[in-house]
């Protein structure tokens, strides 16, 4: 069996990692717990509220400048 963990960071016991926040949001440093239910991995981001293509049609450069 092969398990693919797209968008995940290794989180074995004593491993340190970072979960980056979006622009203007906090990032988090974590220490792994080696949880067997998650195959000793954790997500490395919050995901998207809307798709990239949808965002391109909804937001423009001025919106990005305002956010930062």
Image (cartoon, rainbow, N blue to C red):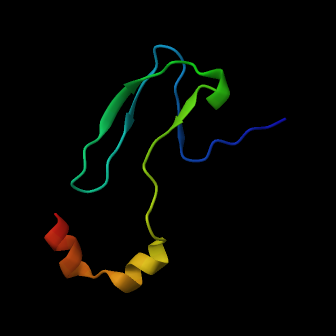
In the displayed structure, would residue 50 be above or below residue 19? Answer: below
Q: Residue at x 60, y 25 (%)?
A: 40
Q: Residue at x 57, y 19 (%)?
A: 34
Q: Total marks drawn? A: 0
Indicate the position of residue 5 as horizontal and vertical percent values: 63, 41
Report the residue that reaches farthest toward the top.
Answer: 14
Q: Quadrant of the C terminus?
A: bottom left
| Side (left or right) of 14 relative to 12 | left
In the displayed structure, would residue 4 be above or below residue 55? Answer: above
Residue 30 figure quarter: top left
| Side (left or right) of 29 relative to 14 | left
Report the residue that reaches farthest toward the right.
Answer: 1
Q: Quadrant of the N terminus?
A: top right
Q: Residue at x 43, y 65 (%)?
A: 49
Indicate the position of residue 53 as horizontal and vertical percent values: 48, 78
Residue 67 figure quarter: bottom left
Indicate the position of residue 41 as horizontal and vertical percent values: 57, 31
Front residue (pair 47, 61): 47
């Amino acid at each position: 069996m092969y398990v693919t963990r797209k968008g995940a960071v290794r989180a074995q016991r004593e491993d340190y990692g970072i979960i980056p926040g979006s622009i203007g949001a906090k990032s988090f440093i974590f220490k792994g717990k080696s949880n067997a239910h998650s195959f000793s991995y954790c997500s490395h981001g919050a995901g998207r509220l809307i798709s990239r293509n949808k965002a391109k049609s909804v937001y423009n450069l001025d919106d990005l400048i305002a956010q930062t």
